[in-house]
Amino acid sequence: MSTQLHQLQQEHLSRLQRDYAALLEEHRLDCLAIYSGHANAFFGDDQTPAFQTYGHFMHWVPLADVQHSWLVIRPHQRPQLYLYAPTDFWHLPTQLPEEPWVSEFDIHLCSDKRQPALEGHAAIIGDTTQLPDAHQHAQRNPDALVHGLDELRITKSAYEIACLREANRLAMAGHEAAQAAFLGASGELDIQLAYLAGSRQRESAVPYQNIIGLNDHAGVLHYQHYDLSPPKQRHSLLVDAGRRFRGYCADITRTHAGPDAPAFFAELVHALHGLKDGLVSGVATGADFVDLHEQMHRQLGDILVTHDLFRGSSDQAVAEGVTRAFCPHGLGHSLGLQVHDVAGLHQPDGSPAPPPSAHPALRLTRTLERDMVVTIEPGLYFIPMLLTPLRQQGLPINWTLVDHCLPCGGIRIEDNIVVTDQRPTNLTR
Ligand code: GLY
Ligand code: MN
Ligand code: MN
């Protein structure tokens, strides 16, 4: 860990100390206990799925996989970290990293699954549903407090932005390895393995299940399998894959035209890169993300017209829902300790800010503020389930061209962007 990152982390922790103290005082709380969470075994089994630490715990403690642990915050006092560290010959015992941040906490290594004592007015946040009820007097996950804490995560400190930048650097090495594997005619599983090797991570550590779709699988938005064998023809590859660094997530998508794709598809991929770049340049303090999303639809309409997929006007393509059939997801979302980070669908005061009814999949509806980090991820897909209903409507869609593109599945290009008062910072470049 570089000295500079340590200094940034110290400033980040000082900011948390200050902001938590203000919030606890506002909510008349003497202490707040944050539970890391723990993995629950599959029903009737002793095996568990991969685990990730609760986001508000990781906001303080840069350990993405600690379980059965507690962090107790009291205004203007040193944070108390109760780290579960059983004496155990089945597993490697928990060890503290030799990193400067540990000196910012009073650390208690616990050999049992103890719940710390909480005095006065107390609250607990985290998934405590499976725990014995040791703190009956404490409020559990009070809405207003959790919204306030979520709000502290919507804008990122310089430390968090540095972590997101490093997560992007590591993920991009994976994307380059995945592209090389595609050029070498690998199938989905081998592209996934190349991605994991290139980004230096094991599969259980990924921030979300990597989407590795060849051909028409590129048109399945959250395609969840990896075919073992390469297909006979290679039209396209869509890779939506990330990486964590100290808990912070990269979320990057690239689409490549293959040797068997029509030249037209490669031109569309190029156009989507241009669309993404144009939308990124609109990311700035004060911009309304719903407006940016609607701008994506207008520009997608232009692309459909320019590339002869739609033989009407761009306005008609938007008004008749054609652009929504070609791109049914949102422009992007907030990014941080969770890949779809908290507070994207709330106003700063905690009141709900649901997506417009025409765009139910949009995960961020806020006015952008400096130091928010968002994804910008326009897409253009050939999804039979969404396009087939349009065939009966007599719309001026060039179905011959659409049918030509169906084997290519679709295109998504996704970058991770820091909002600033001037030009946005693209972490993915
Ligand atoms: N990887 C999920 C998303 O892009 O939102
Ligand atoms: Mn995303
Ligand atoms: Mn993604």
Image: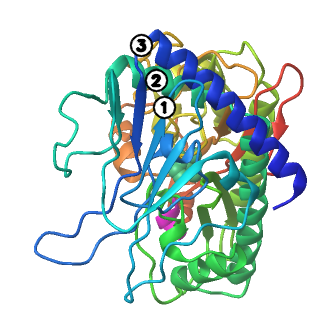
Say whether marks 1 and 2 touch (CB < 8 Å): yes
Q: Residues within 10 Å of mark 3 (few under 14, many from 20)?
A: some
The answer to whether one can see residue 344 in this image is: no
Q: Which residues are magenta?
A: 214-218
Residue 269 in the image, given as x and y percentages of width and height:
72, 54
Residue 279 in the image, given as x and y percentages of width and height:
74, 31
Dominant secondary structure, magenta = helix
Q: What type is the residue that disc 1 sits on?
A: Arg
Compared across the picture, whether 262 is left or right of 331 comes to right
| Residue at 72% across, 77% down | 198
Residues at marks 3 and 1, CA–CA distance in whole angstroms = 28 Å
| Residue at 42% across, 84% down | 91
Q: Residues within 10 Å of mark 2 (few under 14, many from 20)?
A: many
Q: Indicate the secondary structure of the residue bearing disc 3.
A: loop
User: Quick one: label 1 or label 2, which is nearer the N terminus?
Assistant: 2
Q: Quickly name the residue at label 2.
A: 345
Q: Disc 1 beta carbon < 8 A from ligand 1?
A: yes
Compared across the picture, whether 120 is left or right of 227 comes to left
Residue 215 in the image, given as x and y percentages of width and height:
54, 69
| Residue at 30% across, 61% down | 113
Residues at marks 1 and 2, CA–CA distance in whole angstroms = 6 Å
Q: Residues within 10 Å of mark 1 (few under 14, many from 20)?
A: many
Q: Indicate the secondary structure of the residue bearing disc 1.
A: loop
Q: Is residue 164 magenta?
A: no
Q: Quickly name the residue at label 1.
A: 363
The answer to whether one can see residue 97 in this image is: yes
Vertical side of 165 occupied by 389: above or below: above
Q: What type is the residue that disc 2 sits on?
A: Leu
Q: What type is the residue that disc 3 sits on?
A: His
Q: Quickly name the residue at label 3.
A: 27
Residue 318 in the image, given as x and y percentages of width and height:
54, 23
